[in-house]
Amino acid sequence: MLFNSFIFLYFFSVVFVLFYSLKPKYRWILLLVSSYTFYMYWNINYVFLILFTTLFSFFITIQIARNDGVRQRKILLITNICGNLGVLFLFKYWNFFNQAIGDGLALLGFTYHPSGFQLLLPVGISFYTFQALSYSVDVYKRRIKPETHLGKFALFISFFPQLVAGPIERA
């Protein structure tokens, strides 16, 4: 759903009206559902990626905050960084590196047929990955306390007006 399409105008109008008709304490629920609806409009299967990033970062960051050991906190942060960047790498760079390996081996006289594992780049994956990582680093450095409400954290990661355009926000 493009920001300059009629379907987005309709979607945004409905969300806008519903937002101001709800009590403030329930508005986050509407925004979370709207954000996931917006994301699933592109490809419903990619919702599992944003869910993974959200859940993985949420639970690891809670553990970072609860842990007082410097070594354990660092291991948790590195785990979060590697897990999130691993997913980003897979979807953003797999095809490039797979083809580069095939081309490099061909120059050396080896036959390599890159797998048919072609991945489409999910919308906003870089944004929400770096949003989650920025949050984790801020908790690690004790600049902020971790959000203990999973729904509100999920909204922070997936908020639809900035999901595809950014900028990366402080928690």
Image: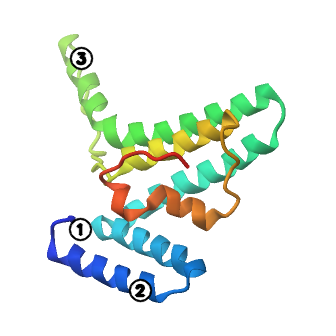
Which of the numbered marks, if any, corresponds to residue 18? 2
Which one is closest to the eye, mark 1 or mark 3?
Answer: 1
Compare marks 1 and 3 and give the one earlier in the sequence: 1
Which of the numbered marks, if any, corresponds to residue 104? 3
Does residue 35 appear left or right of residue 73 in this picture? left
Which of the numbered marks, if any, corresponds to residue 147? none
Query: In x, y percent, where is residue 9?
Result: 21, 76
Of residue 91 and residue 40, the one placed in the foreground of this image is 40
Q: Report, in whole angstroms, how far the alpha carbon at label 3 lies from the one at label 2.
A: 55 Å
Of residue 123 and residue 91, the one placed in the foreground of this image is 123
Regarding mark 3 in the picture, which secondary structure is present there?
Answer: helix
In the image, is residue 157 above or below residue 65?
below
Q: Amino acid at mark 3?
A: Gly
Query: In x, y percent, where is residue 72?
Result: 78, 31
Residue 23 in which image quadrant = bottom right
In the image, is residue 6 above or below residue 103?
below
Query: In x, y percent, where is residue 159?
Result: 43, 62
The residue indicated by pointer 1 is 1
Regarding mark 1 in the picture, which secondary structure is present there?
Answer: loop
In the image, is residue 118 above or below residue 155?
above
Residue 88 in which image quadrant = top left
In the image, is residue 70 above or below residue 50?
above
Q: Are marks 2 and 1 in contact (CB under 8 Å)?
A: no
Does residue 76 appear left or right of residue 110 in this picture? right
Name of the residue lying farthest toward the left = 5
Instruction: Identify the residue at horizontal 23%, vertical 68% (top origin).
Output: 1
Instruction: Identify the residue at horizontal 56%, vertical 49% (top origin).
Output: 171
Q: Amino acid at mark 2?
A: Leu
Q: Amino acid at mark 1?
A: Met
Instruction: Identify the residue at horizontal 70%, vertical 47% (top origin).
Output: 145
